[in-house]
Image (cartoon, grey):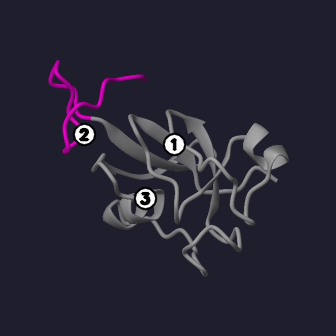
Amino acid sequence: MSAKSGSEDGSSDDGHVAVVRFLQGAKLLGQTKLISGETIVEHAESAGVKIPTNCTSGTCGTCMVTLIEGKVDLPEILPPGLDDYLVERCARLGCIGVPLNDVDVDIRPPL
């Protein structure tokens, strides 16, 4: 699944186009091309998938999803909606999480 995402449109030097996929368990709900700088929630909207949001700043945790595969950077200081316990269980906040390569996301939190 790992691909170099070198350009703004998510394509790498070898022509691979990175994709963000949204699942609920094993069921694929939708997918969209990776757009550099867009959040998980913005990608979900492009894919026709609804991820609930509230604060859009990482405070409330409403948009928590589970990262199955790929890379979504975490802020240096975790926001109030996320803690080390949840991060260890692959939790990411969709409102502030920005995918960096091919990413598979379960829209359900890891709780």
Asked if the residues shown at circle 2 and circle 1 are in contact, with their CB atoms under 8 angstroms apart, the answer is: no
Asked if the residues shown at circle 1 and circle 3 are in contact, with their CB atoms under 8 angstroms apart, the answer is: no
Secondary structure beneath dot 2 equals: loop
Q: Amino acid at mark 3?
A: Thr
Give residue 93's position: percent from left, percent from top: 61, 59
Residue drawn at (52%, 66%), measured in percent from left and top?
95
Secondary structure beneath dot 3 equals: loop
Give residue 109's position: percent from left, percent from top: 71, 56
Give residue 26's position: percent from left, percent from top: 59, 41
Q: CA distance from mark 2 to mark 1?
A: 14 Å
| The stretch drawn in magenta includes residue 5 | yes
The mark nearer the N terminus, 1 or 3, is: 3
Per the rendering, the mark at residue 39 is 3
Q: Is residue 109 found left or right of 101 in the rendered image?
A: right
Q: CA distance from mark 1 to mark 3?
A: 9 Å
Per the rendering, the mark at residue 32 is none
Looking at the rendering, the stretch of residues picked out in magenta corresponds to 1-17
Q: Which residue is the site of mark 1?
A: 72
The mark nearer the N terminus, 3 or 2, is: 2
Q: Amino acid at mark 2?
A: Gly
Q: What residue occupies the far bottom of the structure in this picture?
A: 54
Q: Which residue is the site of mark 2?
A: 10
Quarter of the image holding residue 13?
Answer: top left
Graded by Cα atoms within 10 Å as few (under 14), some (14 to 19) or many (20 or more), the crowding at tag 2 reads many
Q: Amino acid at mark 1?
A: Val
Q: What residue occupies the far front of the structure in this picture?
A: 76
